Amino acid sequence: MASVGPSSPAAAAGLAELGALATDARALVAAARLDRSGWDPAGTPLALVRARGVDDVVRTLEVAHRHRLPVVTRGAGSGLAGAAAAGPGSIVLDLSGMDRILSVDPVDQVARVEPGVITADLDRAAAAHGLFYPPDPGSVAISTIGGNIATNAGGLRGARYGVTRDYVLALDVVLADGTGLHLGHDTVKGVVGLDLVGLVVGSEGTLAVVVGATLRLLPRPVRVATAAAFFASVAEGAAAAVELARAGLRPAVVELVDRPTLEAVDEFRGTRLAARGGAFLLVQCDGFGAEEEITLVEKVLARSATSVRTTLDPDEAQELSAARRDALPAIEARGRVLIEDIAVPRSRLGEAVVAVHAVAARTGAQIYVFAHAGDGNLHPIIVVDPARPAAAEEAADGIFAAALALGGTISAEHGVGRLKRDWAAQELGPASLAVQRGIKDLLDPLGILNPGKVL
Amino acid sequence: MASVGPSSPAAAAGLAELGALATDARALVAAARLDRSGWDPAGTPLALVRARGVDDVVRTLEVAHRHRLPVVTRGAGSGLAGAAAAGPGSIVLDLSGMDRILSVDPVDQVARVEPGVITADLDRAAAAHGLFYPPDPGSVAISTIGGNIATNAGGLRGARYGVTRDYVLALDVVLADGTGLHLGHDTVKGVVGLDLVGLVVGSEGTLAVVVGATLRLLPRPVRVATAAAFFASVAEGAAAAVELARAGLRPAVVELVDRPTLEAVDEFRGTRLAARGGAFLLVQCDGFGAEEEITLVEKVLARSATSVRTTLDPDEAQELSAARRDALPAIEARGRVLIEDIAVPRSRLGEAVVAVHAVAARTGAQIYVFAHAGDGNLHPIIVVDPARPAAAEEAADGIFAAALALGGTISAEHGVGRLKRDWAAQELGPASLAVQRGIKDLLDPLGILNPGKVL
């Protein structure tokens, strides 16, 4: 197999010291250099390390640190912001092979896992004990716990159950120089020392490499109740989501789907959803009170919906949620996509969707919107026109600007990576950025961990 | 009024620059120098600033920074670990006068507050909109939001609703040199940049001064169901709490009370609770499913309890919870107390109570235990014998050692302050401590913010 070949004396020395731990076979390295963001840093990384355990990570970082070689850590490579895309000269540290679920404790409701565990696999292991792992990013079937931790991944159930950070009790990490460190507590509560777990969660591989996690699980809800409603317009659908909050209801799932997305699903599945309304809202309540709560949800939705159906039956729920479940595959069938993830205060959800549609009209870009409406988190999906790639970029910038103008954020759950670095600087402002850079320098003084990302 | 008088040229210069913003009147300064920990740093602070707004805080820190004067920030002074106790030469920065609730938004379910707001007052303001502020430390009627943020306060509802950190979306802080900084997001989700909010929450005044907070609220539960049970022994009560978790139930409140505490309540209130069993367990479920869930709770408890009663009636619930509600006042009636707050993994709760009782037997100290059993958080309360104060200290050390031996933490929700500094170092270990000290030095290079505390 052709090898990449070291690009400098330091790279050659590092490669020699890594020995059999690393491969520089061009095909293997090339296969591990990108993520799902579409961002291509151009050029081939120096080498690939497929770690089988903590010792491999420690050794890789010791060598990288000694020779100042950049390290880009990756799990499944499902990231959407370019954090796991590796440039020339870097060592790709692949943790997807560290995929053991070490323990699931049904009384403490805690799981200990390696970072390469697929998120859905952890949830399945928890289910065997009557438990579940609440964070459920759209990528749950392919993304890893380590990647979820790196981005502080959210998901559909965020409005009620929160995000990855809320489920990480403790972390085993390896610092840039190869030092191992245990952060956090094995207890649900614990306030001794600064919250270093929170600092590492969402740091996208720039502060430390996560090699183990202690995660909270929760009792699996005894039942799930589903309501599915259509509205004449997306503004009315968004307003209905706001009314649910005003009524004091707290569903686990509140998903809004706009008309362009319904039309894409119709084309993809041969359905006629768009004929039923200009927006779709999927609401799920769970737990002991699900039945009573969904009845109240139905009442609120019925005030403005063109139709509402509710069910306690899981099969019927599957059928009712097709408009949401098939949204992304239906859009992806139309071309290469940029998946954005802005958030705004819940009360401004409707304005945000309207603003995104205005960006589409202005730039001529195809944009589809579905949203975790319960927490004001929109996913505008831009289908890139190969003839006009600049329109997609212009549209993304318009979407970010709209998010900030509405008091929101440019990334609710995917992270900054490389693609949103400039916008992140704008959102944070120079004073906050300076503190963040100070922390980065403290933990990674040579700047070898995922350089050029996030900050 | 007699004045404290500056102790050095720097102190004199600082005091002069603060001018009318500060007072060095001995009686006023002395009244603001201690908290409820019982720790007395001896000597009188240099001056007291009663801040009326952000500008006062900025000016105080600018002056303190220029002259390297220590600043000890305080709210209500209800802290239990000595974090708000101020030594000689320091400036006491009292934020209790910054007590405005700036807004409560019923749709976004967000409140903006100043740090001096009393926690119960925020909850009352939320109630006017059908909302509540979930963290409910025992001190809720006297402690401030700023103090709750400083310690990452927990409370009775922690098992279901989490702790203060889970409700802080954004913070306005002033850094040691007087620079103002906005941290976090106004949205429920947000992953842009490192989690600086999490870093400041629980940092006990050592990293920055919190001058404003954006807090999440939740819809107030529609109903609360209560179960109260007695058990022959505290081991059986703790085991029942564990069985609730194993049964997949998730009450908002699971409070365990031991026999010495029941006897104290009996003496205090003239009741005969201890005649009914050696331990008491109070369980509350809330929300739409409360009634169904409490029925299942009752079934689990009835397997081993000597008696169980359940109710949906608020007045009866008040009556049933007297054994828990009166626990602390009843113990405090017996003498000066040290209130500890260890946590262990939930499955080891029974062992932890037994270990605390063994410490009492060994040291001869009077120790009472009640516990937020749902999250493994015990409050061993030591009544200090004035004739043998060393026994109380020995008992505290024994309790901390037991917590660590059981895989737990020495502080679940009160913080490290000054009293638990050495034990915190032991719990964290040198590598983690070094990182924490680095962050402290980064944010407060002159070490003027609450020096000698926590780390």
Image (cartoon, coloured by chain):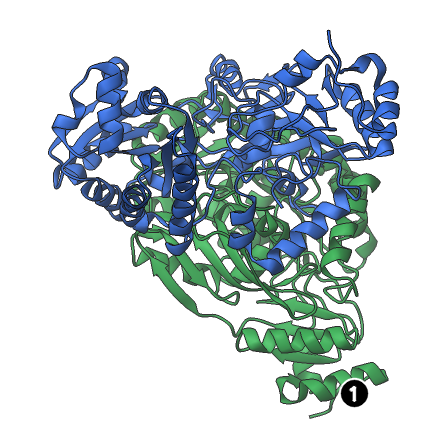
Chain colours: A blue, B green
Q: Position of residue A168 (x, y in %)?
A: 59, 33
Q: Position of residue B172 (x, y in %)?
A: 54, 62
Whether residue B330 is visible to the viewer of this picture, yes or no, is yes
Q: Position of residue A282 (x, y in %)?
A: 26, 30
Eyeballing the image, is B104 above or below A300? below
Q: Classify 10 Å Cα crowding around label 1: few (below 14), some (14-19), many (20 and above).
A: some
Residue type at mark 1: give it.
Answer: Gly
Q: Position of residue A235 (x, y in %)?
A: 21, 44
Q: Chain of mark 1?
A: B
Count of numbered marks: 1
Image-based side of B171 in relation to B425, left or right:
left
Eyeballing the image, is B235 above or below A333? below
- The foreground one among B139 and A439 is A439
Image-based side of B224 in relation to B393, left or right:
left
Question: Image quadrant for the N terminus of chain A?
Answer: top right
Image-based side of A225 in relation to B410, left or right:
left
- The foreground one among A92 and A226 is A92
Q: Residue at x 53, y 28 (%)?
A: A79
Residue annotated with mark 1: B5
Choose top left, top right, bottom left or bottom right for residue B74.
Answer: bottom right
Can you name the residue that lies furthest to the top here? A1
Q: Residue at x 43, y 25 (%)?
A: A138
Whether residue B373 is visible to the viewer of this picture, yes or no, is no
Choose top left, top right, bottom left or bottom right for residue A44.
Answer: top right
Image-based side of A400 in relation to B371, left or right:
left
Can you name the residue that lies furthest to the bottom here? B1
Eyeballing the image, is B385 above or below A120? below
- The foreground one among A39 and A73 is A39
Task: Check disc 1 and report its element: helix, strand or loop.
Answer: loop
- The foreground one among A56 and A42 is A42
